[in-house]
Image (cartoon, helix red, strand yellow):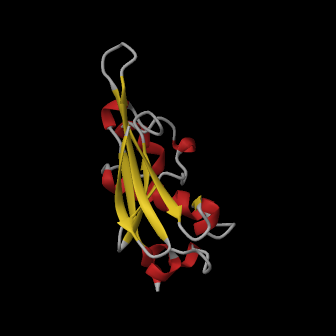
């Protein structure tokens, strides 16, 4: 496992943990986990720390719509044609990457799609996410 910082802010640090394992079979398994560390409260930020309570369904719709555009698929019901395993499994997760102008949800191989699709990054500008963000989140200032 190795890690690196993607963003270091006054209130938080965005980190990436990369790992590879081989347990036999056709290929090794590569994955990355993205974490946001709240320096003020000494804890990992979760969806609940960033987004308002009723935002999950809207975030899921945004992720699905973006995946459709990324994979050139017309309609959520056709996502399996592009390698998504089951549309019901697509939801915001805590593998979140932060950059100066955007936030992305990241999915490991097999998490929502076939291994051949690879890791998936679904990126949104802070401006697009602002209506769904908690105003007391340390990330909210990027949406202003």
Farthest-out residue, right: 53
Q: Nearer the viewer, residue 141 or 79?
A: 141
Q: Decide if residue 74 is in sight here.
A: no
| Residue name at image x 48 percent, y 51 percent | 95
**Left or right, residue 40 beside residue 12:** right
Residue 143 point in image, percent of width and height: 46, 81
Image-quadrant location for residue 28: top left
Residue 91 point in image, percent of width and height: 55, 51
Residue 84 point in image, percent of width and height: 43, 39
Image-quadrant location for residue 38: bottom right
Farthest-out residue, bottom: 144
**Left or right, residue 100 beside residue 128:** left
How many numbered marks does the figure carry? 0
Query: In which quadrant will I find the N terminus?
Result: top left
Q: Nearer the viewer, residue 30 or 17?
A: 17
Residue 57 point in image, percent of width and height: 61, 60
Image-quadrant location for residue 131: bottom right
Q: Decide if residue 43 is in sight here.
A: yes
| Residue name at image x 30 percent, y 51 percent | 72
Q: Is residue 103 above or below residue 82?
A: below
| Residue name at image x 35 percent, y 74 percent | 101
């Amino acid at each position: 496992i190795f890690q690196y910082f993607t963003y270091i802010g006054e209130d938080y640090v965005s980190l990436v943990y990369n790992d590879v394992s081989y347990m036999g079979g056709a290929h090794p398994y590569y994955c990355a986990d993205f974490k946001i560390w709240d320096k003020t409260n000494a804890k990992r930020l979760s969806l609940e720390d960033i987004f308002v309570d009723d935002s999950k369904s809207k975030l899921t719709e945004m992720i699905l719509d973006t995946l459709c555009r990324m994979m050139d698929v017309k309609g959520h019901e056709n996502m399996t044609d592009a390698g998504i395993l089951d549309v019901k499994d697509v939801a915001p997760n805590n593998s979140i990457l932060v950059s100066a102008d955007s936030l992305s949800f990241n999915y490991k191989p097999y998490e929502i799609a076939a291994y051949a699709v690879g890791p998936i990054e679904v990126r949104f500008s802070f401006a697009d996410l602002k209506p769904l963000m908690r105003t007391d989140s340390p990330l909210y200032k990027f949406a202003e």
